[in-house]
Image (cartoon, rainbow, N blue to C red):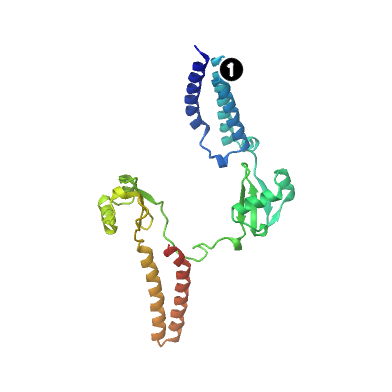
Amino acid sequence: MQEWLIIILRTAGLFALLLLAVPLLGRKPVSGMTWFDYIVGLVTAVMIALVALNVVQNLAYGLIGLFIWFLAVLLVQYLVQKSKWAHDHFYGKEIEVIKNGKVLEENLQSARMTGEELLSQLRRKNIFQVSDVEFAVMEANGDITALLKREKQPLTPTDMRLNVSQAREPQTVILDGKIMDEPLTSLGLNREWLFTELKKIGVNPENVFIGQVDSMGELYLDLFDDAIQLPQPKAKALLLATLKKVEADLLSHALETQNQEWRRKYQRFAKEIKKITEQLEPHLTT
C-alpha cells in the first residue's frame, strides 16, 4: 500500500479515536485549563501526529502507547477528584495574593506573578484600586479571584430589604422561525397564547429569528428583518407608572389628613417609594 494512502487511513482512524476519547477526558473550557491540562493536550497531539504521519511505523505500538497515555490521564483525573493532595500536586494550589487591601509580595513571588500582571487581572474585573479588595487568590489556572470589601460591593435588593420575585431562566419559544413546544409547556403556556401575543404586534412566527419568554411572562422577539421596529413590552412601563401613582397618592393623603402623625408617615412612605422608583427606573425603562 502506498505511503500517502497509509497516512490518510491512519489520520482518519486516529481522528475517530480522538472523538471517542475527548468526552472521557472531560469538558473543561480553555479558560479553566491548568498547566497539567495543557501538557496533556500537547503530548496527545504529538503522539497522534507521530502515529498518523507514519513516523511510528508499527501501528500497534502507536495505538498501545496512546492507550496507555489515555489510561494514565484518566487515572490522574480520578485521583484528583478523590484526593486533595493529588489535586494540589497535579493541578496546583490556589495562592492568596491580597488580604485586607494589602498585596502579599512573598506569595506573589512564589506564584511567579508580577505586580503589573496582578493589576492587569484586577482591571479585567473592573477593580482599579487594590485597597478596595478584601481578599484575592490566584487560582490553579492562573486567574485571579477577588472579593471586594463590604462597602465597595454593589448594592443588592437584600441590602435595601426589598422583596424581589424569583428569577427564572428565559425560555426560547421560537428559534429560526420554528415554535418550540417543550419550553412553552414548561412555562405553562401553549401555542394559542403565543399566537395571540404575536398577533398583537402583527408578526408571524416564520419571521422570528429568536423569541424568548422571561420570568415576568414577557415575550421578547428578534426578527430576521432588523429594520422592523417592535413595540416595547408594557409590563415594566405599567409597573413604573404604578409606583409613581402610589407616590402621588401618598403625598395627596399627606395633604388631606389633619392628623400630624399620619401626615409624617405618608410623607416618609412617599420618600421611600420615590427612592425605590429612582433605583428601579433605569431597569424598567430599558
Give whichever of 105, 89 is nearer the camera. 105
Residue at the far top in the pictured view: 1
The residue shown at (47%, 78%) is: 268
Residue type at mark 1? Answer: Val
Q: Is residue 68 visible to the viewer in this orientation of the structure?
A: no
Q: Which residue is mark 1?
A: 56
Query: Closest to the observer: 90 or 214?
Result: 214
Q: Which residue, as the protein is rendered here, is positioned at the far front? A: 227
x, y percent for residue 62:
56, 18
Determine the secondary structure under disc 1: loop
Whether 284 is drawn above or below 174: the answer is: below
Q: Furthest-bottom residue in view? A: 258
Farthest right residue?
106
Which residue occupies 65% across, 41% down? Answer: 93
Of residues 252 and 268, the one nearer the viewer is 252
Count the marks: how many?
A: 1
Q: Nearer the viewer, residue 168 or 229?
A: 229
Percent across and percent down for residue 25 are: 53, 32
Figure quadrant of residue 51: top right
Specify whether 80 is left or right of 166: right
Q: Position of residue 200 (x, y in %)?
A: 27, 59
Q: Is residue 279 above or below residue 45?
A: below
Residue at horizontal 38 percent and vertical 86 percent from the top = 256
Q: Identify the image quadrant of the C terminus.
A: bottom left
Residue 260 visible in rendering: yes
Q: Is residue 134 above or below residue 6?
A: below
